Image (cartoon, rainbow, N blue to C red):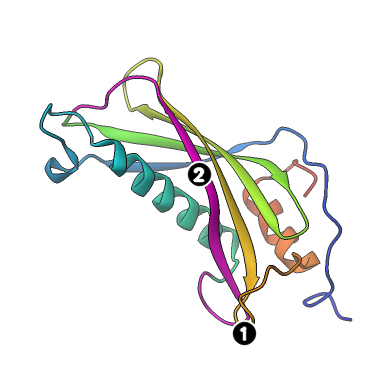
Amino acid sequence: MDLQTQAAEPSQIRAGRSFRVEVPVRWGDLDALNHVNNTVYFRYMEEARVQCIRASGMAVGAGQRNFVLANVSCDFLRPILWPATVLIDVQLHRVGRSSIEFDIEMSVKGEEGLCARARNVIVGVDANTARPSPWTQAELACLETVFPGTGV
C-alpha cells in the first residue's frame, strides 16, 4: 500500500487548536422573536465543518471519499441577534478509525461569552460502497495542517 491508500490507526488526539470561521448573520436567519433561529445554528456548524475540511486539503464530495454527518448536538446558551458576525471555533476532539469528532463553540464578534456549544461527528465513507472507510495517513496529514500540534 502507498501513502495515499494505507489505512491509518485511530489516534488519541491531544486538545488542539481551533479553526475559526466568521459568518455574518443574515436578516433571513431570524425567527419571530428576532433571534437567530435554532435551525440556523446547524447551518453555521455545517459551513464551519466544510470550510475546515476544505482548508485541510481533503476533497469534499469528490473522488473516492465522501463525508457524512453522523451525530450533532447543540446547547443553546444565549440568543444571537441581528446584526452580528458569528465566530465559530472548531476544535478537533477525537479522531477514530473512520470518524472525526469536533467540538464547536459559537460566539458573537465583539461580545463576551458563548452563544452555543456543540459536538459534531463526521464519518468518512467510501464513495462507491457508502460504507465507512478508515482514514489514510495522507488524510490525517491534511488534518494536521489545520490542527497543528494535535498529534493527528
Label annotation for residue 38: none
Task: Decide if residue 109 is on the left or right side of residue 58.
Answer: left
Range of the magenta residues? Answer: 60-81
Q: Is residue 36 above or below residue 12?
A: above
Residue at screen point 63% across, 81% down: 64
Task: Decide if residue 3 is on the left or right side of residue 108.
Answer: right
Comparing 115 with 57, the one in front is: 115
- Which residue carries the number 2 mark? 72
Q: Residues within 10 Å of mark 1 (few under 14, many from 20)?
A: few
Under mark 2, the amino acid is: Val
CB under 8 Å between discs 1 and 2: no
Indicate the secondary structure of the residue bearing disc 2.
Answer: strand
- Which residue carries the number 1 mark? 128
| Residue 38 counted in the magenta span | no
Residue at screen point 75% across, 41% down: 149
Under mark 1, the amino acid is: Asn
Where in the figure is residue 114, as x and y percent of width and height? 42, 21
Of the 4 image quadrants, the one containing the N terminus is bottom right
Residue at screen point 66% across, 45% down: 147
Comparing 54 with 124, the one in front is: 124
Indicate the secondary structure of the residue bearing disc 1.
Answer: loop
Q: Residues within 10 Å of mark 2 (few under 14, many from 20)?
A: some
Where in the figure is residue 138, as x and y percent of width and height? 75, 68
